[in-house]
Image: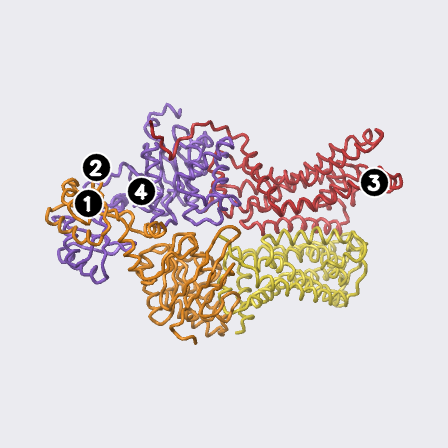
Chain colours: A purple, B orange, C yellow, D red
Amino acid sequence: MGDMGHPGARDGVIQVEDLSIIYGRHRALDSVTASFPAGAVGLLGPNGAGKSSLLKTLLGFLTPTSGHASVLGMEVAARPLDVRQKVGYMPEIDCHIPGMNAVSLTAYLGELCGMPSVEAIQRAHEALYYVGLGDERYRNVETYSTGMKQRIKLAQALVHGPGILFLDEPTNGLDPKGRMEMLALIRDLARRKGVNVVLSSHLLRDVEETCTSVVMLSHGKVVGQGTIEALKGASGELFEVRLKGSQRQQEQFAAALAAVGCSATPAQDGMLEVALTDGHGSELIFAEAQRADAQVRHLVRKQPTLEDVFARAVGEK
Amino acid sequence: MTDTAAPIIRAEGLSRWYKQVIGINDVSLTIAPGITGLLGPNGAGKSTFMKLITGQIRPSRGRCLVLGQPVWNNPPLMRRVGFCPEQDAFYSGMTGLAWVRGLLTLNGWSRAAAQEKALAALAAVSLLEAKDKKIGAYSKGMRQRVKLAQAIAHEPELLILDEPLGGMDPMGRRSTIKMIKDWAAQGRSIIVSSHILHEIESMTSSILLVNHGRIVAEGNVHEIRELIEEHPHRIFIQCDDPRQLAGRLVGWPVVAGMRLDEDGVEVQTTKPDAFFTKLPDVILADKVRVTRLLSPDDNLQAVFDYLVK
Amino acid sequence: MSPLAAVFRLSLAVLMKSKRTLVIGLLCFLPVLGSFAGTSLILSGVATHELTGFSLTSFIIVNAYVYVLLVVVTLFYGTALISDEVDEKTITYLFMRPVSKTTIYLGKYLAYLVAASSLLLPSAAICFLIAMTADASGEAAHHLPILLEDLTVLALGIVAYGALYALLGAWSKRPVFVGLGFTLVWETLVTFIPGYLSKLTIKHYLLALLPHAVGQRGILGLFESPTSPAAAVVVLLLTTAGLLALGSWMFTNKEYVLEQ
Amino acid sequence: MPIYDQSYRPYRGTLSSHSMRWLTIARAGLQHYLSRRMFLIFLFTAFIPAIARGVIIWLSHQTNATRDLTSIDGAWFRNFLDWQGQFLLLVCIWPGAILIARDLKTNAIQLYLSKPLTRTDYVAGKFAILAGIAFLLMPAPALLLFLMEVGLSTDTAFISSYFWIPFAILGYSLVVITGAGLLSLAASSFTRSGRYAGLLFFAIVFFSQVGGQLMRFITGDHGWIVLSLPALMDQVGALFFGGPTEFGLHPLPSLLMYGLVVGLSLLVLRRRVRAVEIVT
């Protein structure tokens, strides 16, 4: 099947048809058929769902047992090197080239993509500025924290100007501030810089904040794909709230909500997850907080999370 | 025993640099007993200070006293200090119990006494059921807890914990914070390092702020909170009709500035406390349906930028 | 429990649990295989007529053990004592115990002695016993003292090389390279230069103690200026003590933490 | 006045094909090691024998007294290369044995193989690093000594009878460096600890020596000596330079053994150098 002539190739950045990878009894991928549109696409699923296997097949690391895949119109099996020249890959595991600093590492990997050495150094600096690495770029990479290594991994994936980015768990090991900055970078790349992104993550909040559509995997099978909006449908009344107030005041607030049939349960980083039953608007949160003389410092309405969408999709299959 | 009021850590003109890179630059301070939070962005000199007070490195200049004694190559002092390092380093082939018991025998206890203390420590960090499992097969949270176990097993007077909550899920975080508070209640002094403000806030009120190798601020977390409060604060509110809400808010004296964009309004204020207390009145009075309310720079970095300026 | 014993037991447990002990154990098994093959060839008459069980063992002891295995095993365990723990950053836990660094260093050295000798000495003895089946039954008892001498030489080798490689592990980031550089280049180079220079190697004293004919030592033996066995043992023990003292001093004063 | 977007810009330049990737890896590796003080000190010590022999050549041309003491001929050069073989073994232990082991430990191999280069490019690049260093150790000084001898000799007697020596030097070095280099890389790809890989290499080389000697000692048939890798080097030396070997010349067994070493090393490299751990 000619790769350019294939009808689906034009709209889909990545086409995967009936792809299977089987190691002995373990079916890492089970006849996966999916089309990744342009822009930022989330590759969702718990650990071990086959996300990494799919990414590695698209990179030509794994030869599929059956079926085939094409990236940017190029058949992976036929032209793995051309595909990898157009792809920027950010591996999941902690990795770096030993004995180098951020600049020489990024430039070196740029050269390995075929860039002339002078341009590689210049592009390396540009990429490192973009990911927010300041003058610590001249320090040996072994002394870097996980957060800084994640930034270099993104920089080396960008240095040769790829048409598409494969990001495997990009916010791994980042503190809250680092995570927000990484997601902002990914949004900027996909929305304003015209770089297609495949973001593989088991953190559904990351995908929700960066991607427009998703492909959902579970046990090697596709359990759902499409735009997040379409998959989510109607939006319920769920809020992520942080109060400024003592422990007692927070308990009073939670009790008051419970009395009215709503609920406030503690979540990560000192947040509260507030679920309002229908008929109650966010004013109720402000009212109850005021009555418990606590301050609402942070309130974000959450549409039904991708967790619910994913749970529903897995439930159906 | 030194009298309890004496400082647990004293640094006098303490400096440490690695070739040209400054780790810690001429720091003089005393840390009183109780829980002290050591706070600072990554690479701010926090880990250098931790390595100095645990005797892993020598000062380039000045002195560093722990419980009144110099700490470099001072084994007897280690009987009174427990350390939980940040790195994820273990003998992965060994079981949790064997490892903690082995380390305890180094304190001089017999195998039986060490076994008993090790079990007590593992129970304290609720790892009893995994005691015979190899550490290599532990989850990140369990590895963090077994590190804590070896730090408290010999019942030290002073506990030094480097990023104890790193990589833990909310449940694990909450139980570790509770544990740390219980240990302090038993009269132990604890130094906890972290780069996340509200984690430290939940454990203690006395904080040491470190940035670029210098002590930026020392004292009570509420004072630090006030510092955050005083510096210009940005609050973003998203609702159905942002212009109408903006109209109501502009009249408030506490509001210093405002910026409107398509789906919400961003308010600048120097008295966020007063603003947040008054805000619900407007929302309830005008039945404003608020979908997002957040202040982008209410965090540690904001404090540093403000203090360092 | 005394701190020294505690460090010893902990370090031994770590050494014995590591997967690599399996591979090194396999390497120690190879000479036993060689001895078995040689013996069966002698018994089946295929081997050259003047080859006896005893000459087979002395060949194996000199060439397989003293020249290769002794270096591989001592270098592997000697450097693993300090370098592995520093690389894996587990040394911090030991430093935070009320135990002097010298005690840690010596405790680990003792653990190394047990680990290395528990692999080398039994396998050497087995080689001897297998090969002895090729000779007349009386021969084995007659040659037993020779075996004991060989085992002492190997034990002294473990003790001396261990002290040297532990020092290298405490001092340099690349102990294997420096260690093999010493063994390959210095210990062979120096024997080509006649006179006293060869007294500056551990191998010279080990060879002086070896109860086997000079011939089997190959070219190294030609330039040797003789040292009496008693002197050799004294020198080896003194060198070991000196190296251990230097190693523990280095270990106590060096900072083993990755700088920022 | 248009405001240019300072942040990320797509790359306009052209990306060359993957043919010369191994050269990029080799250049980066050589640059890394040749800029390190420790390594340069080691290289200098490896040059001392060459300097000593240079002095001997110089002296042999000044006073006729030493003329008959040391005859500069094929055996002389072969002996020099044999001696440099010790340093080649050391270089195979470090940096040779850590070239791939450290990439496995730091997972750098994922970064390498996610770029448009094949596993052959990667192994060829790493081999070129080791070969580059080995070239500085063995053939380079030997050729310099040869040129020095030719330069100093007043008549053409030397050049006419020994014109073949440079080719022998290059041939011998190529064969030995390829064999030792591939074996070292295979050991390096076998484990994540460079230290352990170096030890494995040392054990393989010297156990093969013991094996060869033992089989010869037992059976009396000198052909077995070829099992020993150092003896194999000696056989290759004899093939290129002529002259005696300790236990006779065995061209066919040597070729077989050399093929075995290279073949096995390539097999291990093909299996171990991959971007994905096949975990069933």
Mark 1 or mark 2: which comes first in sequence?
2
Q: Chain of mark 1?
A: B
The alpha-carbon separation of the residues under discs 4 and 1 comes to 20 Å
Residue type for callout 3: Leu
Amino acid type shown at disc 4? Val
- CA separation, marks 1 and 3? 93 Å
Q: Chain of mark 2?
A: B
Residue at horizontal 46%, vertical 56%?
B25
Residue at 41%, 43% in the rendered image = A151
Disc marking residue B262: 2
Check contact, mark 1 vs mark 3: CB within 8 A. Answer: no
Query: As displayed, is residue C105 above or below residue A54?
Result: below
Disc 1 target residue: B291
Labels 1, 2: front one = 2
Q: Secondary structure at mark 2?
A: loop
Q: Are marks 2 and 3 in contact (CB under 8 Å)?
A: no
Q: Which image quarter is the N terminus of chain A in?
A: top left
| Residue closer to the observer: B135 or B238 | B238
Kind of residue indicated by mark 2 = Glu
* Distance from the alpha carbon under mark 4 to that under mark 2: 24 Å
For the point 45% across and 30% down, which residue is it?
Answer: A82
Residue B53 locus on image (x, y percent): 46, 63
The residue under label 3 is D59
- Disc 4 or disc 1, which is closer to the eye? 1
Q: Position of residue C121 (x, y in %)?
A: 66, 63
Please determine if labels 1 and 2 lie on a single subunit: yes
Q: Chain of mark 3?
A: D
* Horizontal side of residue B282 vs D79, given as left or right: left
Q: How many marks?
A: 4
For disc 4, the chain is: A
Q: Is there any visible trace of residue B150 in the rendered image? A: no
Which quarter of the rendering shows the C terminus of chain A?
A: top left
